[in-house]
Amino acid sequence: MRIRLMKRVAIIYESIYGNTRQIAEEIREGIREGGNIEVRLTHPGGIHTDDLSNYDVILFGSPNHNQAPTLNLMKFIDRLAIVELENKLGTVFDTYTGGNEGIAVKKLENKIKEKLPGIKLVMEGGSFKVSGRKGPLIEGEVEKARRFGQKFREKISDEE
């Protein structure tokens, strides 16, 4: 009989006005629905880079800030490059306004591929629309984030 170990997931995000935090929380709930998964939500200053070696899965989220992820999150990824993160799974997400869908996602994906090659991005990043600079989220985006978490849970379960 095969024993199924609990997966440990870290969601590291920046949130300036609370919208990206809300998306991170919904993604967490979508991931948790499958059971047997522990999910930790934190910002870059809330976890030591070395601690991430204890997680199986790492997600990164950021608002699109001046056509890029936040500088703080990008610097965190730079610092994370010295940590042993082989055989980890992950994805990314962003929040955006106007026609800027996916801009921060693509830059996060590229940064992870460059600096953290041990993390296998198992699905395309998600982008969630905010009505204005300070929000709130566009109607339907909260549910979309939960579905993103559910789909991600399926992807990481397939990787066992």
Image: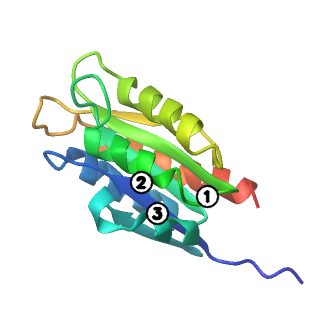
Name the disc covering residue 85, or none.
1
Amino acid tagged 2:
Ile
Q: Secondary structure at mark 1?
A: loop
- Looking at the image, tell me whether mark 1 or mark 2 is earlier in sequence order: 2
Can residue 43 be spotted in the picture?
no
Amino acid tagged 1:
Leu
Name the disc covering residue 14, or none.
none
| Mark 1 surroundings: few (<14), some (14-19) or many (≥20) residues within 10 A | many
- Name the residue at the front extreme: 82
Q: Are marks 3 and 1 in contact (CB under 8 Å)?
A: no
Q: Is residue 16 above or below residue 88?
A: above
Q: Secondary structure at mark 3?
A: strand
Residue drawn at (54%, 41%), measured in percent from left and top?
Answer: 115
Quarter location, residue 137 = top left
Amino acid tagged 3:
Ala
Determine which residue is flagged by label 2. 27
| Mark 3 surroundings: few (<14), some (14-19) or many (≥20) residues within 10 A | many
Q: In the image shown, does 100 or 75 lie closer to the viewer? A: 75
Name the disc covering residue 10, or none.
3
For the C terminus, the image quarter is bottom right
- Looking at the image, tell me whether mark 3 or mark 1 is earlier in sequence order: 3
Q: Secondary structure at mark 2?
A: helix
Can residue 53 be spotted in the picture?
yes
- Name the residue at the right extreme: 1
